[in-house]
Amino acid sequence: MISVISLWLAMRGMDLRTLASVLATGRYGWLVPAIVVIVTGQWARAIRWRMLFGRVEKPSARDTFWIISVGYLVSTVLPLRLGDPMRAWLVETRTPAGGAEALAAVVVERVLDLITIFAMLAIWLPAPAAVLLEAQLGAGWWSSPGRLRIATASFVLLAYAVVLVMGRASGLLARVGGNMAALATRLPGIRVAPADARRFAHGQIERFGGAFHALSRPSAALAALSWSAIVWGLGGLSYWLVMPATGLQPTVSAAVFAMGAAALFAIIPSSPGYVGVFHAAVVAALWILLDIPREQALGYAIVLHAVTFLTLIVLGVAGMWSLGLRWEGLSRRAQRLSGGDPA
């Protein structure tokens, strides 16, 4: 429903003949380097994710790349964004590494993504970011570019403080979780020895905290943030490369703003592949920042969405082949992860 509403908002009052003309006259040779950059960005994501495992055993670089590609395929095709827990399951079952560490690394990865996106918007584009937020949320403190920049800096520091606390307190959390698991064995119907329950819960929580503990070291945190900058820098480059394909004058500010808007709007629950939400975010961003005609902005959003998600789908299918997976098995696992009928 949200995707349908978003598409309606993006296309409301639009001249469809102008939109068709934008798509028909595109210079699609620009999509070739864009695809290369998207694939390179996926490899950078894989390197960063593997690094977040910390000092524990990691999957190989090759397996990490294919697993993250399969995860993006699942999130693109299926609802509920099940690609992240799917990645943890694949690490657990297809590599010597642990699923708990993999899931923790995914969580830290998402925190780093938010930090990087907010930093890019607030450092480079505080004024249009404030305008976009005010248009969506109404007037508030976020309407001031200066306050938005201060809030972003505070968010970055707070996020790192949380990571630091989680890393330093992982041992304590593991002991508490182990004791709670031992107490839970007293409930009716549970036939697990308290010592076994304590040992299992303690190990899982301690392993989950490994990724947070890895970032508690300033050098590791700086490396992770540097790779995040590379990941999102490549993302901005792909947005920039698609602009001339649809007749837009490519600018760094427009590419970064459109990417940031799409990333922030992606938080909203929507259909698989962020259809509608993605398009509405990009149209709103380009219209606010550069006063680009909405037909041309939507044409750009359609082409950008298509080339990005088709590339991710192809990489995901290649990852399935490389890991010896079948779609039927992945879909059944996705049903279990979502709490649906596994049959």
Image: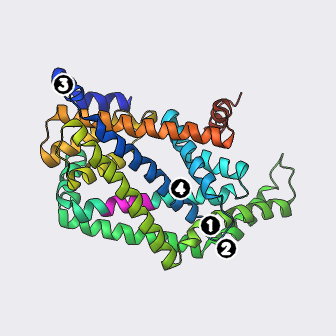
For mark 1, does the 10 Å Cα neighbourhood hold few (<14), some (14 to 19), or many (20 or more) residues? many
Q: Residue 204: x and y, percent?
A: 71, 61
Q: Which residue is mark 3?
A: 21
Residue 209 numbered tag: 1
Residue, x 17% and y 61% (percent of image)? 144
Earlier-in-chain disc, 4 versus 3: 3
Q: Picture quarter containing residue 169? A: bottom right
> Which quarter of the figure is the C terminus placed in?
top right
What is the tally of numbered marks visible in this picture? Answer: 4
Where is residue 3 drawn, in percent x and y? 37, 31
Asked if labels 3 and 4 touch by Cβ distance under 8 angstroms, the answer is no
| Mark 3 or mark 1: whose residue is earlier in sequence | 3
- Marks 3, 2: nearer the viewer: 3
Is residue 247 one of those drawn in magenta?
Answer: no
Q: Earlier in the sequence, mark 2 or mark 4?
A: 4
N-term-proximal mark, 3 vs 2: 3
Q: How many angstroms separate mark 3 from mark 1 (CA)?
A: 53 Å
Label at residue 46: 4
Asked if residue 50 shows in the view, the reply is: yes
Separation of disc 4 and disc 3 at Cα?
Answer: 38 Å
From the viewer's perspective, is residue 170 above or below residue 20?
below
Q: Amino acid at mark 1?
A: Gly
Instruction: Give the residue type at disc 4.
Output: Ala
Are discs 1 and 2 less than 8 Å apart at CB?
yes
- The kind of residue tagged 3 is Ser
187 or 222: nearer the eye?
A: 222
